[in-house]
Image (cartoon, rainbow, N blue to C red):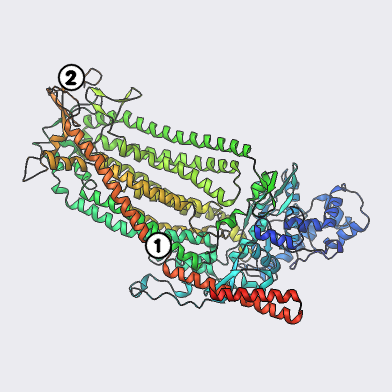
Amino acid sequence: MYGAAAQPLTHPVFSRRFPSPGCGGEKEAATMNRLGKKGDETLIEMALSADDDIAVLTKFKSTRSEGEECNGPLCETTSTAESEVPSSSEGLNSTETTLLIPEHQVQSGRRFNLFLKRRLRIDKRHQSKDSIFFRDGVRRIDFVLAYVDDLNKEWEKKLERRKEFERNLENAGLKLEREDKKSDVCFNFPGQESEDGKICFVKIHATWDVLITYAEVLNIKVPIKENDIPSTVENPLDCMLAPLRLPKKVMHPEPDYFTAPFSRDKQELYLINDESTFFSPSMRNRIVNYILTRCPYGTEEGKKKFGIKRLLNNGTYSAAYPLHDCQYWKKANDPNCESERYTLYMEWARFLRFYKEQPLDLIRKYYGEKIGIYFAWLGFYTEMLFLAAVVGLICFLYGLFTMDENMSSKEICDPAIGGEIIMCPLCDQDCEYWRLNTTCESSQYSHLFDNVATLFFAIFMGIWVTLFLEFWKRRQARLKYEWDLVDFEEEQQQLQLRPEYEAKCTHKKKNPVTQEMEPYLPITSQAVRFCISGTTVLFWVSLIIASMIAVIVYRLAVYAAFASLMENTQTLQPISGLLTPQLATSVTASCLNFVIIMILNFLYERIAIWITDMEIPRTHMEYENRLTMKMFLFQFVNYYSSCFYVAFFKGKFVGYPGAYTYMFNRWRNEECDPAGCLIELTTQLTIVMAGKQIWGNIQEAIVPWICNWWGRRKARNNPENLYSRWEQDHDLQTFGALGLFYEYLEMVIQFGFITLFVASFPLAPLLALMNNILEIRVDSWKLTTQYRRPVAAKAHSIGVWQEILNGMAILSVVTNAFIVAFTSDMIPRLVYYYTASENEDSPMSGYINNSLSVFQISDFPDRNKPKLNPENFVICRYRDYRYPPDHEKKYLHSMQFWHILAAKLAFIIIMEHVVFIVKFFVAWMIPDVPADVKAKIKREKYLTQKILYEYEFEKLKERLCQGGKQATEEEFITTEGRMELSRAM
């Protein structure tokens, strides 16, 4: 069917048509019952079962051998019907060619093929290359299927699948139109050289009957009356925010309407001005995608096969996608095209517009609610980060301006104090004794992040997280009202089974909700699959922990090498004060850890998808939730394990000189810098967080651009006026069903960095803010310019990510309390200030000497004793609170150690309770739904019910006047009573 207006065959065998098909869902079940559904047939199966003659004809054609003469009515029908069209739906093999074309025409097939190709090219020159319509210029292209006909060994099998699939689509009511510009093999006569890839296209158009049938099945809301509720009172600060605003036409591309779920029986109720534009392009491609995912294409190995996803996986089709409405850099020439892609690019996707608000309504209209809600959340998160970044910057500047007043770093840098303190070797035998003032510069930089402001910022971020989550709930509630998602329930999606679930589950049972027979997975099979899944997840989590231990071993193994190298290399002496062995080890280990994280992340992404597919989740929502939890668990351990080690384990289990603790009885545990481990945690956090963000932006922006640039090189061989809209979009990258999942995952991992460990790095929110400003424009740019248009999907929230964020918010209070207590020197300083200080003029003087214990060098065992002691030191110092060698409790923990430990535990309890009380109080004070939104929702429900009842009332009056039957009168009285009840409400 290659003609400009490919019509259904008119022979009586093909004349029976049925309403558009559907699958799954309570609404669809009611629709199918009205259409005479039998047993557990789907709408598509009902249409196919009615076309028994087509099946007989197909079977008749497939059973004839090559060269067999055909006579009789069936052959006449076939020849008559298909002779009107230059080729079959997929191109025929040589056997079918002999049957359909007389012998003398087969000899001239190549000449006939060239004539058709030339004719089609002439037609295309009269049509705009950016046209999104069929050749008739009237029917809109709602979806495009592409395939490569490469004549390999599976060519015939793929051909039969495509023929059956496309025939079922046409029986379902969809209109198809084929394009073969890129290949002669798409025709029936192979042999011509294709220009660049043998790619064939099938354009799909959804008719009005298909759209209204599935609008009812999918419970799509459509306008019934323009909204007369007055808008919110204007903000007096709007004049100040005017430079950040976008034009009203861009922000609100459509008027606001009262809406109601579509019903075929009430079409007069809706504001249908033009059937071709009543359903937006995003609604249309969502409906067509719903049909494509459920349309059967045959039976293989005794199992019913259906769905475009399976056909894409087995290579029958190479791509399936809806079209962009125009080129992004210029408006479409067609006046019927709204050029929304161009508007999005100009007003949203360019980096120079980074300071502008996002056109969320236009994003929702073009891409669907699911993508719209993601950009709404990302924009709100970025706005809230501005406050956290400002406070964090103030705390950092406080540390910077008070650096010279820090008594601890002054004593370390003083030659008379730090220069006279001899520290014990940092490794066994090979390391030498060293003077404390060699860590002067690192101790000064440590004060930037380890000061009084750290405590304030940790408490502030605990409250900020609560404000962010609570205000997002309010923002989300407002979007649900504005985008007609108030009545959208996830339970509706629960009724829509995944096609993969229906295909793989052979057992059936009655659904207690719909009372329909539906497939299910037995408990025993579920248990086995979950055991395999759980074992695999535990194995990979263990692999991450093993890799972290390997990095720790690297730290322990190379520390001695760094210490020896820096002591014995003269060229490194000028920077030895800044680049200490501890810092060098930390930086190199952090970089190594980041590389391992990226490698494991690449591998586990594929493992997690495989595991989730193996579990066969029942619905799309279950699939996304399970995959989300697996990926987040892995990413959590992968990205945060090294930070947890530095924050809570490094330097905590070292022992003391002469009785050090060893890992695997071989590698001595590493110690913290005399100024504390907080600077090392800051280093680790900066490298992993910044490295992830830089690598993520490279992956998201540069990689798709390079792939598209390489793909466009092949297209330069084609004349520009023949490079059509569907071919341009085909050469773009695929966003994929999990594209949004990875965007959420990236942001949630970042959220963990700025909340779980923010006490160690107040600048983390500032880095996140700068990254997110870039992230919004990178995501919008790649979605608008580098990717095919995603299939529209509905969502009324960010889903399971909300619960993950809530869990991380609670965990962040605990981790920050432990960081302040055990990783920083805040508590030991406070204990010294109030209990051990003897100098009233300078209370913190003497703190360094007080925090270092004394060890007698003669007590070193041979395993730990340094090989060299050129200056014949008698004692050395180490970081701990223990009794000196001349005390009766030699080298045991002193009473001050227990005082500090008690203070740390008390601080953790007090800080956690204070922050949690404030968090819960703030959450209780802020309602999840704004009061004005609640009022608008009630008002809209009331007015919508009133409009619907008035419509029913008028219809019943007409029926009463026409019929006058008693049943109609009773129905009239009932409806009138419902209207009175509605008014009373």
Give the side of residue 56 with respect to residue 377, left or right: right
Provide residue 393's location: percent of width, then percent of height: 26, 55
Residue pictured at 67% horizontal, 76% vertical: 973
Viewer-closest of 197 and 200: 200
Where residue 983 sits, quadrant-wise, is bottom right
Q: Residue furthest top?
A: 862
User: In this rendering, does residue 743 appear at all?
Assistant: yes
Viewer-closest of 866 and 53: 53
Q: Is residue 748 above or below residue 281?
A: above
> Which amino acid is tagged 2?
Asp
Instruction: Give the CA distance from mark 2 to mark 1.
Output: 66 Å
Disc 1 marks which residue? Answer: 927
Give SS at disc 2: helix
User: In this rendering, does residue 467 appear at all?
Assistant: no
Question: Few, some or many C-alpha atoms within 10 Å of disc 2 (few <14, some 14-19, many ≥20)?
Answer: few
Disc 2 marks which residue? Answer: 859
Provide residue 930's location: percent of width, then percent of height: 42, 66
Q: Is residue 862 above or below residue 967?
A: above
> Which amino acid is tagged 1?
Pro
Question: Few, some or many C-alpha atoms within 10 Å of disc 1 (few <14, some 14-19, many ≥20)?
Answer: few
Marking on residue 481: none
Where residue 957 sits, quadrant-wise, is bottom right
Q: Disc count in the image?
A: 2
